[in-house]
Image (cartoon, rainbow, N blue to C red):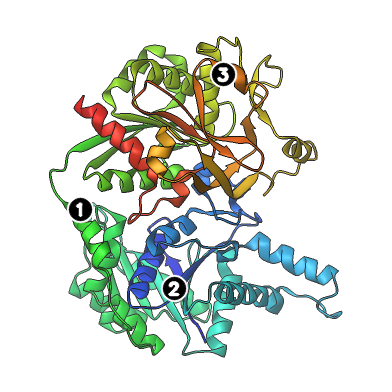
Amino acid sequence: MSKVIFVTGGVMSGIGKGVATSSLGKILQSYGFRVTAMKIDPYINVDAGTMNPTEHGEVFVTNDGLECDQDVGNYERFLDRDLFRENYMTTGMVYQSVIQKERNLEYNGKCVEVVPHIPEEVIARIERAIKKDHAEIMLVEIGGTIGEYQNLLFLEAARMMKLRAPKDILFVMVSYLPIPDMIGEMKTKPTQYAVRSLNSAGIQPDIILARSSRPLDLPRKQKLSIASSLREEDVISAPDITSIYEVPINFEKDNLGKIVLKKLGLKKKKTDLKDWKRMVATIRKPNKPVVTIGIVGKYFATGSFSLPDSYISVIEALKHASWFHRHEPRLHWLDAELYEKDPRALKELKNFDGIVVPGGFGSRGVEGKIKVIEYCRKEKIPYFGLCYGLQLMVVEFARNVAKLKNAHTEEIDKKTPYPVIHILPEQEALVSEKHYGGSMRLGLYDCRVLPGTIAERAYKTPRIKERHRHRYEVNSKLLPRLEKKGLMVSGLNPQRKLVEIAEIKDHPFFLGVQFHPEFLSRPLAPHPLFKEFIRAAVKNKKK
C-alpha cells in the first residue's frame, strides 16, 4: 500500500505549509521514491477559478485544465513534474460529488450523512490521486489551520485512514513559534495549544516543523517534545531563509527525510540532491550582478498590506531565469493605476531593465497598463506581456501604431469600433448563461512557432504546448491591419489559427503570449521565454 503523509497547519496560515510539503516531497523523491502531492482547500468553491486572487493568491492551472491553488504550482516546481486535476480538492468538490451520488441512488437508498459519507468521499479522492499517479508516497496538505471548523471533516478523513492503516499514515504539523518584540523570547505555547487542538480531533502529530524567524534552540525543542509527546529529534527547526529552494537542504540538516522513512518503515533507495544543491549554491552566491524587473499589476494590496502571492508563478519564473543567467533578480511592484493618474510617473520605467505585465481581468488599471506598454515600445525597454499583457499590447499597437482610434478589448468596451480583442463564440454563450466557473479556455494547447522570431530563438523547436486561462482572444478579422503595420504573429494554435504569441521587430524584446508560460517554469528548468526575456533585460542593463 502507498504511504500517505498529512501536512496540517497550527497557530496561523501563510507560514509555508506548501513549501514545507514540497520540500519534504523533494527529499523523498531524491531518495528514489515516486512522490506526488495533493492540496485540500477548505472552501465551498468547487475550484479556485472563482476565488479572489487578492485574498486567496494566484490561481494555478494544471495541464488538464483545473484551476487550483498556488501550492500545486509549488509541488510541480519542487518535484519537477506535472500534476493532475486529481491532485486538488475543495469542500465544494466533495459536497457536490456526494450530492450527485445521492441523486443517482449510488448510496442504495441509505440516509446520506455528513459523517461518514463526506470523509469517505475525501478518502476516495486521495486514493484516486494515488492510483492516477502510481505514487509510492502521497503528501496531502490540508489548507488553513487545525482549529478551523471547516477543516474538521478533512481531519476526520485522515483519522479514519490512520485507523485503517496505522503504519502507512503519518502526520506532520507546521506551526509558527512567535518571538514577540516586547519579550524577545521564542514562545512555544501557541504550538502546544495547536497540538492539543489536533489531539481533540483524534490525531497525534508524528513530526512538528517549527517555523520561526530564527532557528529553534534546544530548550524550546525540549519544551515542545515534552508538551507534545514527541521525541526531541521529531521537532524540526524551520527558520526563515532567503530562498524557499533552500528548505529541503535545511530540513536534511535535521535528518527529516530519514526520520520520515523510519516512521513509515521504508528504506532509502538512493540520495540525489546534487543538481538541487548546485542550484542553491548559485542562488546563495554573493555579489551577483542585479537585474531589475518591474511588474505592473493591480492584485498587490489587501488593506495596508501587499500580497505578491497573486503573481507567485510569475515571480518564481523570473527568479529561475535570472539565476540561470547568474544574476540576482530585484523585483518591484508597480501599480497600474498610478500611471493613469500621473503619466509623468512613466519616466520611472527607465530605472528598470525589463517590464512585465502579467495576467488579469477587468477594467481597473487597464489604461495605466496600456500607457506602460506604449512607453516600453517607444523607449526600447524589454517588455513581456502574459495573457492580458498580450491583449493590452495588441490594443496599444492598434491604437498608436495602426491608428485604429478607440480600439479596445470587448471585455472592457463592448461598443468599441475596433474590437481587436474579442470573445470566442462558445465563450460568449457560456457568459450569457452565467456559466463562469471552469468555463474558460483552460489547460494545455498546441502552438506552432514561426521561424525567424524571438519565440523561435527562445524555444528552439517549432512545436510547443502551453497552459491557458482566458476567455478573450486576438480578433483574426482585424489582425491583417495590425500585421500590415508591423505586428508579427510568431505563435499560432494550429487547430484554430488563434494567436498565441505576438512580437515586433527592431526592439530588444517586445513580446506577448496568450498563455501562461510561468506555470511551466521550474527552478532546474527555467522557461525558455523567461530566459530570453531576462537575457534581453541583462543586455539592456549593460547598454
Who's the residue at 29% across and 20% down the image? Answer: 350
Q: Secondary structure at mark 2?
A: strand
Q: Is residue 449 left or right of residue 244?
A: right
Circle 1/circle 2 CB separation < 8 Å? no
Amino acid carrying label 3: it is Leu
Given residues 11 and 44, the one toward you in this image is: 44
State the mark number for residue 282: 1
Q: Which mark is first along the chain, 3 or 1?
A: 1
Whether pointer 1 and pointer 3 mark residues with C-beta atoms closer than 8 Å, the reply is no
Numbered tag placed on residue 35 in the rendering: 2
Q: Nearer the viewer, mark 1 or mark 3?
A: 3
The structure residue drawn at horizontal position 85% and vertical position 74%, both measured from the top left corner, is 105
Which numbered disc covers residue 482?
Answer: 3
Q: Position of residue 282 (x, y in %)?
A: 20, 53
Q: Quadrant of residue 84?
A: bottom right
Q: Is residue 350 left or right of residue 200?
A: left
Residue 110 x/y as whole percent: 83, 80
At x 73% / y 62%, what residue is drawn?
96
Task: Give amino acid for label 2.
Answer: Val
